[in-house]
Image: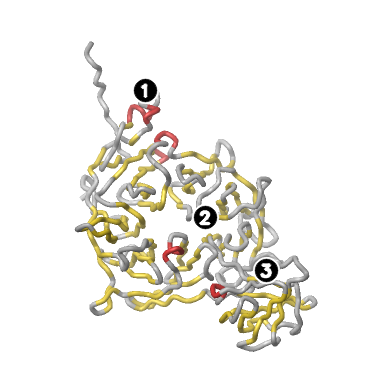
């Protein structure tokens, strides 16, 4: 018998799982493909050939991994940051930012082991940076095209880890005020070199004093500058160490930080003052909360917000933070509620906002999840966006970036270096996966706005003349779009 060859008028379903090849009653079957390679699907159903990756520059170290971060003041002033072992390098206008004949470079405390964990959030010309609890929060400020400053974000009043609960572990300041005092630990050895920049708060009677560590002499002695005078110079067991955040984001004009050395603790700065974390009862005071689970102690991985809610992703599930007031969505110390929305669990890494969804990688790293508000459910629901192509994520997703224009695509780097794309326009029921192998391994992704599109930038590991090297590359503009 002759084989039927039905007309295929759309590829908007992208590549689908082999388990769906025989399920011809599914809508995705009609618009899907067994394999979509080096093509990406568009919301209008067309399949467009992927353009090439253009070489921009070699990374600083051929034998070390690096990350890409974005700094976008607007579409005319945007930068890609190469974050590598103890340095940042910058790219703008399709090329590397140079100072004289050399690449412009910023020294950082972040080692190769740190850079994969970096999370950032931007306010005007300042980028706030968190590093998986390994370093104090930092601020990168642009003063000019080749004039950038990286410094410790010197917070006040917090954020702090939970209070010490062991009476035999004490801290003693050598003085109640001044610079260069010593803090001596008895009964434990808390200090390491990474504590430089960390806040410490001590309580004498009913008064809390505060200091910032400037150097570490030994595991039991640190040097610090007093920022809020201590009431006495005696040894006390009422103390808290500053929290180094892992997750970071903005919510209702507050800086929200979480994770790190106290994995389920969430802080929100004072309103309109991103480095002030003094808690209190006034509406503009900072907020300190913790998320709780029946399954154990959640480890917060990311925070992301809409106008009225802050979504928190942790390894044991996802939580919503909101005011609880129907009359006013503003979260304050006197109006804050936390409720668990799901228990999918999140892998390390920031979530992305796209088309009404919070997009994140599930803790197995093989599933792309999306949380959205549902009017039908009158609440937030979770969709598994990789369900119909569950084979395509392989052993796990390594990095993600969202491209809004010209096509709405979530780009993802797989553990084995294959570049994936997911065309995503849920209002038109479009969600299609595609893969884009290249002669190398894609290790990092980022997008930045440009005048004619959102540019996708990559770090690609390639073998050249038998030697392994790494390059910063940019995806060319696709064909078939508006002229």
Q: Nearer the viewer, residue 415 or 432?
A: 415
Where residue 150 appears, as percent x and y from the top left, is 44, 75
Q: Which residue is mark 3?
A: 279
Which of the two discs, 2 and 1, labels the residue nearer the N terminus? 1
Which of the two discs, 2 and 3, labels the residue nearer the N terminus? 3
Q: Nearer the viewer, residue 443 or 3?
A: 443
How packed mark 2 is, by other alpha carbons closer than 10 Å (few <14, some 14-19, many 20 or more), is: many
Which of the two discs, 3 and 1, labels the residue nearer the N terminus? 1
Say which mark, if any, is on residue 304: 2
Q: Which residue is mark 1?
A: 22
Where residue 386 appears, as percent x and y from the top left, is 43, 39
SS at badge 2? strand
SS at badge 3? loop
Q: CA distance from mark 3 to mark 1?
A: 59 Å
Q: Quadrant of residue 195?
A: bottom right
User: Is residue 32 positioned above or below 452 on the image?
Assistant: above
Can residue 455 be spotted in the picture?
no
């Amino acid at each position: 018998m002759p084989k039927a060859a039905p007309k295929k008028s759309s590829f908007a379903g992208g590549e689908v799982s082999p388990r769906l090849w025989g399920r011809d009653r599914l809508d995705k079957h009609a618009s899907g493909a067994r394999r979509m390679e080096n093509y990406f699907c568009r919301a209008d159903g067309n399949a467009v050939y992927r353009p090439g990756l253009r070489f921009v520059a070699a990374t600083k170290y051929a034998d070390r991994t690096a990350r890409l971060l974005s700094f976008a003041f607007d579409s005319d002033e945007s930068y890609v940051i190469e974050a590598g072992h103890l340095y940042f390098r910058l790219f703008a206008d399709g090329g590397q930012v140079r100072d004289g004949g050399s690449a412009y470079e910023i020294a950082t405390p972040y080692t190769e082991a740190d850079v994969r964990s970096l999370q950032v959030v931007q306010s005007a010309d300042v980028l706030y940076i968190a590093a998986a609890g390994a370093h104090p929060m930092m601020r990168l400020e642009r003063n000019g095209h080749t004039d950038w400053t990286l410094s410790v974000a010197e917070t006040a009043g917090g954020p702090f880890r939970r209070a010490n609960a062991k009476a035999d572990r004490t801290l003693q300041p050598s003085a109640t005020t001044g610079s260069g005092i010593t803090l001596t630990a008895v009964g434990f050895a808390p200090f390491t070199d990474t504590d430089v920049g960390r806040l410490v708060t001590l309580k004498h009677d009913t008064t809390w004093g505060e200091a910032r560590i400037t150097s570490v002499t030994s595991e039991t002695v640190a040097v610090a500058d007093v920022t809020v005078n201590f009431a006495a110079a005696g040894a006390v067991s009422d103390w808290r160490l500053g929290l180094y955040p892992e997750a970071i984001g903005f919510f209702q004009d507050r800086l929200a930080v979480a994770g790190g050395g106290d994995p389920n603790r969430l802080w929100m700065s004072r309103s309109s003052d991103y480095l002030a974390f003094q808690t209190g009862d006034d509406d503009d005071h900072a907020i300190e909360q913790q998320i709780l689970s029946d399954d154990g102690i959640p480890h917060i991985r990311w925070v992301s917000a809409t106008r009225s809610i802050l979504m928190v992703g942790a390894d044991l599930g996802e939580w919503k933070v909101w005011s609880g007031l129907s009359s006013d969505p503003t979260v304050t110390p006197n109006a804050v509620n936390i409720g668990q929305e799901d228990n999918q669990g999140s892998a390390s890494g920031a979530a992305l906002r796209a088309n009404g969804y919070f997009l994140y990688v599930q803790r197995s790293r093989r599933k792309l999840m999306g949380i959205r508000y549902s009017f039908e459910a009158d609440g937030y629901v979770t969709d598994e966006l990789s369900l119909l192509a569950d084979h395509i994520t392989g052993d796990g997703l390594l990095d993600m970036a969202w491209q809004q224009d010209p096509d709405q695509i979530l780009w993802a780097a797989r553990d084995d270096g294959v570049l994936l794309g997911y065309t995503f326009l849920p209002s038109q029921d479009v969600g299609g996966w595609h893969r884009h192998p290249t002669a190398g391994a894609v290790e990092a992704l980022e997008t930045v706005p440009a005048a004619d599109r959102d540019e996708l930038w990559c770090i690609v590991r390639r073998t050249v003349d038998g030697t392994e090297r790494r390059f910063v590359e940019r995806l060319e503009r696709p064909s078939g779009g508006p002229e």
